[in-house]
Image (tube, grey):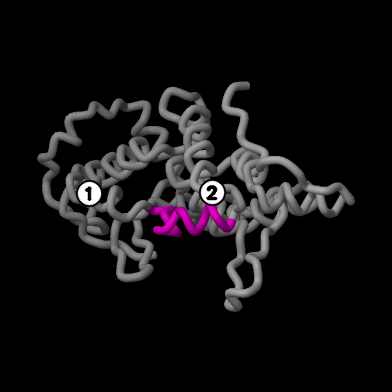
Amino acid sequence: MSSRKVNGMGDICQQQQQHPPGNIHDDRLTATDAAGGGSDVYGEFQHWCLRTYGDSGKTKTVTRRKYNKILQTLLHGDEENNNNVFQKEKITTTTNNNHINAKFKFWVKSKGFQVGTAERDGDDAPVLYVPIKTACVDGVSGGEQSLKRVAVVEDFFDIIYAMHVEMTPDPSKAPKHAGQKKTYKAIAETYAFLPREAVTRFLMSCGECQKRMHVSTGQEFKGPRPSLQLDQ
């Protein structure tokens, strides 16, 4: 992770739209086919995520809008404090017209968000990181902290899929699907603000996992792939 010069909030928003932080797979049709459900899997899961973790919900998650707002707060605050770590031009775009109150600024500061770059595939778009305490050992919380990348709600599908499905070099072999615990552990090692509930929901929509579960219990898999129930 490294610091970089950011030209302004308009550039940030444009880069976020072109290169989402968690957008691991550009071809979602391939991803949803590997998940055993077709293109409707992404749409159903995305709809559920936005309903459950959207801006209107009181959840500990970060939407794309909130993500950009945090970036704006950090970079604008850095300019006000004359900090030379992150240099940027004065924000003049309409994005800056959104009022950021003192409570939100305090929350951003208390979380310790940091701006860096992904440094992947030549993409130098600004990326948010947050310090997270190490996992508890024998009921005692670790004292050390490590930086985790902030997961964006709109990118949950891509993030979970990348950790859940392991593509094999041999095209004749089917992709390997990890279990819930292994998938969530892999996500938690890299990302923050992605609830375990979202991983469970994703696996519920994974037709290949549902099929494998039926086979392992000695039952013949019949009928259509189980779909997400959006109304609770």
Residue bounds of the magenta highlight: 21-34
Circle 2 residue: 38
Q: Is 22 covered by the magenta stretch? A: yes
Label 1 Cα crowd, 10 Å radius (few <14 / some 14-19 / many 20+): few
Residue at 56% from the left image edge and 51% from the top image edge: 160
Give the structural element (helix, strand or loop) at label 2.
loop
Sequence-earlier tag: 2 or 1: 1
Q: Are marks 2 and 1 in contact (CB under 8 Å)?
A: no
Residue extending farthest right: 218
The label number, if any, that marks residue 14 in the structure image? 1
Q: Position of residue 207 (x, y in %)?
A: 66, 48
Q: Is 153 covered by the magenta stretch? A: no
Q: Position of residue 6 (x, y in %)?
A: 21, 55
Q: Position of residue 8 (x, y in %)?
A: 17, 49
> As rendered, which of 28 and 5 lies closer to the eye?
28
What's the residue type where badge 1 is placed? Gln
